[in-house]
Amino acid sequence: MDEKVIMRNLEPETRAHTFEEVALGYNDEEALREANRCLQCPNPRCVQGCPVNIQIPKFIKAIREHHLEEAYDIILSSSSLPAICGRVCPQEKQCEKMCIKGFKGDAIAIGSLERYVADYALEHKLNASHIKPKNGKKVAIIGSGPSGLTCAGELAKEGVEVTIFESLHKAGGVLTYGIPEFRLPKKIVENEIDNLKAMGVHILLNTVVGKSITLEELENTYDYVYIATGAGLPKFVGIPGENANGVFSANEILTRINLMGSYEEDAKTPIKKGHKALVIGGGNVAMDAARSLKRIGYDVSIVYRRTMEELPARKMEIEHAQEEGIIFDLLKSPKEVMMDENYHVTGLKVAEMELTEMDESGRRGVKEIPNQTEIIPCDIIVAALGTMPNPIATENSDIVTDDKGLIIAPEGVTNNEHVYAGGDAVTGAATVILAMEAGKKAASQIINQLQ
C-alpha cells in the first residue's frame, strides 16, 4: 500500500502536561520513504496551491537524492521561514489539497518534508546563499510577525538595508506570543530570526511606531515603509457580565503563557489556577488556548455554537485537542457571564442552538432553540473570537483605513506611494502563510520600484 508516512507525536498522556513540541518530525528513513511517494508531476498542481510558490517537486527530488542542502536552497528561494511554515501552515487546504495522489489516496506530506529539510538546515547552521551586495537603499518594516519577517528576508536577499521596528521586547509577532511552544518551539522562531539577522536585517525592539517614532519620520528616513502590524486587538462576545474577573481574551492568555512564562512557578504574571476553564470559539486560536490551559492544570471545554463538522480549526489541531482531553460543548451560544458578589466568574449561561440551511458563505446557519438555556460552572472564560488591527502605527498619519480599521492597500500599496501594507493589518486575521505571501509580494513590488 502506498500510504503516507505519518509523523510521530508525543503520547497524549505525556503531552497534556508539558509544553514540549507534540509533533516529533521525520527521521531520515521516514523522510526518504515519504519523498519516494512523490510522482514528480511535470505540471505540479501542488506548486499552484502554495501561496509562496515553493518548487515542491524539486525540493522533494533533492531529498530523494540525499542533497538536503540543495533542497534547503530550493525552499529558501521561495520562503524565508521554512521551519515555521512546515509546522503551522495549513498544507491540507493548500499544496497537499492540490496533490494528484490525494484524489485516490493520501497526498504527499509536503509540510512534513519541508519541516524535515528546514530542521536539517537549522541543525547544520545553513544560511541563505546568493545574497546581493548592499545597494544603498533602505526600507523600514513595522512589525516582526510572519509578514514583516518575510518581507525583510526577500529585501535583504536583493541587497536592501532593512530595519524592522517591533513594539514588544521579543521579535516574531504572533509566531512568538500567539502560537504555543508545543506547536511551534520558540527556539525555531529565534533561529529563523537569527538567519535573517545574518543576512543583514536589523531589528529594533521596544519601539512603538506611532509613539516612539512616527510613521512620517520613517518616511523621511527610508526609501519605503512596509506596515505589517498584524491584528492584535481581541474581539469579545458582547454579553452581560463580560467585564467580570476571570474573563480573558485568548490573546492575553497566549501572550502571558508564551511570552511571559505564566505557567512557571516563579512567574511574575501568573495565570490564576482553577479547576474549570471555558474557551469560546472554534478556530485554531481557540484550540491553542484550550490546549495551553490544559497544560497548566485546568479541565477545559470548548464552547462552540455549531457542530464538529463546522469547526474552522485545522483537523489535526482538533484531533490533538480531543486526544489531550479537551471537551467540545457544541451547539451552545454564550448569553451571560455569571459571577459572585466579588465579581469573580462562577459560570457561563448558554443557549441551546440548532443548525439551519446553508448561508451565502457556504456554512450552515444557526439559531437559538427558544427557552433552552443552561449554566456551565467555570473559574475562567476565554474569548477566542478573532482579532482586529491595532491602529497605533497609522494614527495621526495620512494612511487610509476602512470602518473596521483595516488598512486600504489594493495590491499592497496604500494611498501613500512610499508606504506598503500587508498581512492581517490589511486582510484581518488570517493564516501565517497568507501573511507571508503578502510580505513576499510587497518585497517584490518595492524591489521593482527601487530598480
Image (spheres, helix red, strand yellow):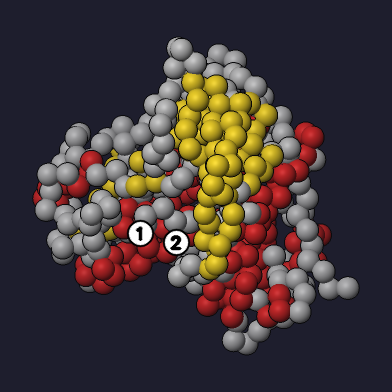
What is the secondary structure assignment of the residue under circle 2?
helix
**In the image, what residue occupies the spot 65% across and 33% down?**
300
Which label sits on residue 415? none
Residue 140 on image: x %, y %: 25, 50
- Which residue is labeled 2 in the image? 434
Q: Height in image: 83 above or below 100? A: above
**In the image, what residue occupies the spot 43% across and 23% down?**
244
Among all residues in the image, which is located at the extreme front? 371
Q: Tell me whether the residue at label 1 lies in contact with that at label 2, contact meaning CB atoms closer than 8 angstroms.
A: yes
Q: Is 404 situated left or right of 435 in this image? A: left
The residue closer to the viewer here, 6 or 152, is 6
Q: How many other residues sit within 10 Å of disc 1, few (<14), some (14-19) or many (≥20)?
A: some
Q: Is residue 220 visible?
A: yes
The three-letter code of the residue at mark 2 reads Leu
The residue closer to the viewer here, 371 or 271, is 371
Snapshot quadrant of residue 85? bottom right
Residue 143 on image: x %, y %: 33, 46
Which label sits on residue 427? 1
**In the image, what residue occupies the spot 28% across and 47% down?**
142
Q: Is 98 situated left or right of 440 in this image? A: right
